Amino acid sequence: MMDTYALLIAATLNAGTVLALASLGLLINEKAGIVNLGAEGMLLCAAIAGFAAVVHTGSDWLGFAAGIGAGAVLAAAFGVLVIWLNTNQYATGLALSLFGAGFSAFAGIKYVQQRLPERPHFEIPFLSDIPLAGPALFRQHPMVYFAIALVVALIWFLDRSRAGLVLRSVGENPSSAHALGYPVRWIRFAAVIAGGALCGLAGAYLSIVYTPLWVEGMVAGKGWIALALTTFGTWRPMRVLLGAYLFGGVTMLQFQLQGAGVDIASQFLTMLPYIATVVVLALISRNPAWIRINMPASLGKPFYPGS
Amino acid sequence: MLRLEQRAEPSRAWSIASPVLALVLTVMIGVALFAALGKDPVRGLEIFLWEPINSSYRIGELMVKVTPLLIIALGLSVCFRSNVWNIGAEGQYVIGAIFAGGIALTAGKDTTHFIVLAVLLAGVVGGMLWAAIVAFLRDRFNANEILVSLMLVYVAEQLLNYMVFGPWKDPQGYNFPQSKTFEVATQIPRLMPGSRVSIGIVIALAGVAALWVFLFRTRAGFAQQVGGLAPQAARYAGFSSRKALWLALLVSGGAAGLAGALQVAGPIGQLTPYVPEGYGFAAIIVAFVGRLHPVGSVFSAILMSMFYIGGELAQSRLGLPKSLTGVFQGLLLFTLLACDTLIAYRVRWITPKLLPNAEGAEKSQRAQRH
């Protein structure tokens, strides 16, 4: 029985890591004032790029690099459009998501039946032998710990470092940041690229580690859920991480209930994460003042340096 | 260096030229893509831009695809003009199809053709109900309509799966997840024998006229758009933003639901897990490329349908995956957004010299001449 719980916790952390990586990336974007609705498209393209790289090279790490690269390239295209051509952020992100869905399906057609080399098994010596905590916490893929480290790093970066302060000022009040001589557009561009790279890492983790295969549309809305998580976490890295684990848990609950033979049609269980997102969004957004205090003040607004 | 300079007012010429330029750019990227894949680019272009319209049969098939795209895009135009971002039309389409299918399945051997009216009405109601959830959560809880409407797409698809794997599964269907084929009486009337084009295209064109009148000739249509363009002006004028939100979502949801009904009771003829074909997402591109204008949407719906048929032809003729359609559709929206910059800005070439230096150089030249 204890083993079941341990496995459930382990699976929750694993599922949550995909969402956490993507959502932390989007958090960086949004702290700089940019909403990238293209997350779903970036995850999809990164998933196929990462998967294909592993198929051809046999190296998971090159796969992650390919995913990061794919995410960053797409984010760069998005960034040029919204930052320098002042296009509407929502429409441009949407275009990226639609393009990503089409392009990943197109590029991935040859990889649908492919299998990856045998998956490595990870465990931390000694710690992984502790009962319950061992199998639950210490037999994870390194990327799970990376996500946690990333949260710590982001908290430090945003709250304690000068660069983080500049990033936040660009998202709160770009005109003031510009007046102080900061290159607002380049800072925003760097944030967009960082966000894309992390979404790419999330996509690659999905297709290389979480479900090691490629299926058209396999991201199945995780990019959109990651977008919702930044609001859910009120733009705080730790809350975003906990939210990601919560949603990872909901996903796992669905399999757990199915396995336990609960008499609910599987389709209703599959709906759970999506319905949970809607409910959580409604509850968290209910109080506009609460959102306004936490949201970067210039989120979604274009910035033209007056010249 | 190149520099963008804001125009005094948006350029009307560029607002029409921009989609054309975007298409040209998409075609150029397409040519490069075909060449990179080792296919003859000319043949590729022919398949996407000429073959879909080179026979009356093909034009009929084109109209079959134009129908749902145009109807959904008209609804979305109202939505986007009011600055309401409903991107879950696909879900509203699916629920419309489920509702319409529910009515169609009640038909027996002696049901008359009038049931078609009930089928279409059910579709509209279904789509409206699904969009109403978005409106309610936005209105009452301030929940972001983009994310809510999109999440509901996945929920709608699972509902459809539940119906066709469960209660509505055809007992004589060899265990396939699909409903029984609808009775002939429920079939949407076709325009002419030998073609699959239905009265749906007439409804769509009537919608174009109705939307044009609503947007440009009625006070309600004006009020609806002011909220999107200038929220504060709308508030001073006493136009209710809540009313605009509900109207935008109900109209677009109803339109998407109607398209779903026309599709299941038309070309598909039964409920299957393959009812969602992505028209709800493609219609977003149709609406933007059509400048959120009813007449513009007609042209962009035709173009997008050509991409669909071109993709199918590219699969059978060139052995390229059908998903090429999605690549081109996404590219078109991308290039359009980039080209749209030219509506509000003009591109200027500015010599990267600092102004005082330039003046100084001029002075010294003048001094030399004297």
Image (spheres, coloured by chain):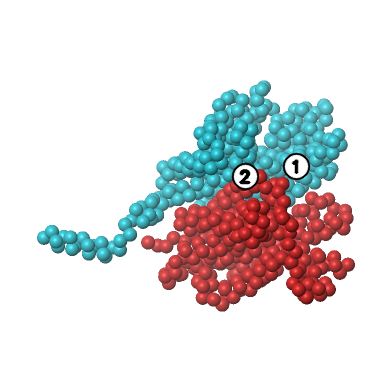
Chain B, chosen colour in render: cyan
Label 2: chain letter: A
Residue at left 81%, top 34%? B180
Q: Which mark is residue A106?
A: 2
Q: Which mark is residue B121?
A: none
Residue B324 in the image: above or below residue A182: above
Q: Residue furthest bottom?
A: A160
Q: CA distance from mark 1 to mark 2?
A: 22 Å
Chain A, chosen colour in render: red
Closest to the camera, between mark 1 and mark 2, is: 2
Local SS, label 1 = loop
Residue A182 left/right relative to B131: left
Residue type for callout 2: Phe
Local SS, label 2 = helix
In which quadrant of the rendered view does residue B148 lie?
Answer: bottom right
Q: Residue furthest top?
A: B193
Marker count (numbered): 2
Residue at left 80%, top 60%? A253
Residue type for callout 1: Pro
* Pick the front one: B293 or B164: B164
Q: Residues within 10 Å of mark 2 (few under 14, many from 20)?
A: some
Relative image position of residue B62 (x, y in whole percent): 60, 31
* Residue B128 seen in this snapshot: no
Q: Have a look at marks 1 and 2 and say if they share a chain.
A: no
Residue on which the image places disc 1: B273
Relative image position of residue B334 (x, y in whole percent): 52, 48
Residue B48 left/right relative to A304: right
